[in-house]
Amino acid sequence: MCGIFGVISSKDRPELGALVASALNQMQNRGDYSAGVATIRKLKFSRKDYRRLRAMAVSHTLEDFNPFEVVRGVGKVSDVFKDKEAEAQKLKGFMGIGQVRYPTAGYTFLQGAEQLCEAEKEKMKVESIQPLIAPFYKVSMVHNGDVHNFKEIIEQFASQGLRQATNNDLEAILKVFNQEFFAQPESTEAVERVSKSVKGVFERVKGTYSVLTMVNNVGLVAFRDPRGRRPLFFGVNKEGDKIVDYAFSSETVALEKMLFKGTKEQKYITGKAAYDEVKPGEMIFITKDFEMHRRQIVEPQLFFCPFEASYFMRASSFINDKRVKTIRREMLDLMWKRFEAEHPEKYQHLIENKDKVVIAPVPRTAESAAIELANKSRALGFSYENAIEKNPFSSRIFMQPTQKHRDLQTIDEHYIYEEDVKDKIVIVVDDSIVRGTTLKHDVKYFRDIGVRQVHLFITFPEIRNPCMHAIDFHTNKELFAYGKDLEQMKQELGLRQEESLIYAKPEELSKAIGLEKQNLCDECYKIA
């Protein structure tokens, strides 16, 4: 999972890099392993003069003819862009793209990498941070996704004499795009070159990906694989009736906070125009002369990832023209109605002990759902408490690279306010259980401070199968629900017979998001 953002303007903007970095900061929830921004500025030469003058440039003055700048590094946006004024001064231009990343399938060396010298390995490590760059033709690219046939593609290029340059799976997409694009004559119309190149990517690169690409002296290209598991929205800035900027983003909140407007006729609940999406299998190309082209390259077969709604996205973003906060609230409303119908004895026990019932969300993505339950149950006499405090300086445990890292961080992750829950019946709301690391610790924590009962409501179905689509759980054995029935899961969590473990149903997920079940990816929770 990653967050990407891109902008193309009708003219150079001195603050372009700062704008992209600020947008990435709005999506820090999507990854904090690395961050980077690349920009391209307009040059005051014709293509003919550019080539002639560049050929005559002496020493460092050659850089006068380099329109391309990049700043990237390991860490959060605030770590990479510490000197905001200096970086903003550097990252000027009319096109800019950036990414925040948490690594999944990328960052792997192929066979034979052990023969590389340490200096080469270190260089590859730096070059693996997005945006990736093809410096000769000044092409830069970012993505949110996983490439499944990365090894095969890289080996194909290696057999032609082009060795692996990074340990990031985006390199496969970048090489295929460049090969398709630059194999066509320069006299070919730009939109045709770009369309054929994107089609080539769709045909040759297998996996899940939303991509932004800058090509010097050509334009900005956005495309999304035909299944559309990963989102990609776009908005505009206008001066009067004239569009002066286009922007693309993994989440609508980044567009909104950077003051880009939606273009659809549909309105959000706020009354504002909704942001359009790059459709699955679609390409949107904004030329250097600021002409927009939209083409459906291949037939869309939407298979959207519902984990975006449950976990990844900020509650303030929109999916399918619906606020994520609203989706999470509707999820729990549906679950609570089912709980009342299917577990009448447990429900009645809660009602009879209403003055002892406390609703407590696991921060932060479950808070929207817990508030819905609190509003619904206020008439029943239940109370709501932010009884679980997340360490504000810790990363999301799910994003830690190994189980050892997750176990160590779990100790430091949550603080539970004893005075809020001691001698109480606690309804805990959480967004999902992947490996169970945090909830096992929390249930024990509740026991140790004297909680009467624990009832768990999980707003995502049981995750039983690995995901190969830009989410970091790739084996069955690491998954908490794999090979277990509900009673076995309760036992492993430390729940007693009279307590509850309620998972969301796929049909509830579908109804809350507003997409048909066949349009939601179910690979991680379907029962084989």
Image (cartoon, rainbow, N blue to C red):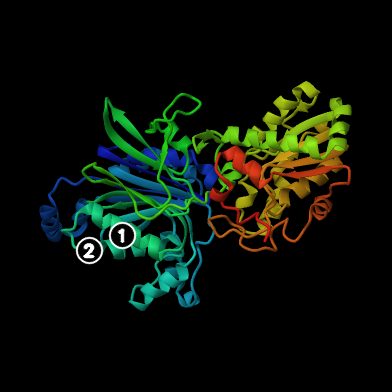
Mark 1 crowd level (few <14, some 14–19, many ≥20, 10 Å Cα): many
Which residue is found at the position 45% from the left and 55% from the top? 209
Residue 300 appears in the picture as rendered: yes
User: Percent position (x, y) of residue 225?
Assistant: 43, 55
Question: CA–CA distance between discs 1 and 2?
Answer: 9 Å
- Is residue 413 placed above or below 474 in the rendered structure? above
Q: Label 1, secondary structure: give it.
A: helix
Residue 424 appears in the picture as rendered: no
User: Percent position (x, y) of residue 49?
Assistant: 10, 53
- Is residue 51 placed above or below 361 in the rendered structure? below
Q: Label 2, secondary structure: give it.
A: loop
Which of the numbered marks, if any, corresponds to residue 151? none
Q: Which residue is mark 1?
A: 197
| Front-most of residues 137 and 80 | 137
Q: Dots 1 and 2: beta carbons under 8 Å?
A: yes
The mark nearer the N terminus, 1 or 2, is 2
| Front-most of residues 83 and 28 | 28
Q: Amino acid at mark 1?
A: Ser
Which residue is found at the position 31% from the left and 62% from the top? 178
Q: Quadrant of residue 369?
A: top right
User: Percent position (x, y) of residue 129?
Assistant: 44, 56
Q: Name the side, left or right, on which 40 lies relative to 229.
A: left
Q: Name the side, left or right, on which 445 lies relative to 46.
A: right
| Front-most of residues 452 and 469 | 469
- Is residue 520 placed above or below 121 in the rendered structure? above
Which residue is found at the position 84% from the left and 49% from the top? 494
Which of the numbered marks, if any, corresponds to residue 184? 2
Q: Amino acid at mark 2?
A: Gln
User: The C terminus is located in which quarter?
Assistant: bottom right
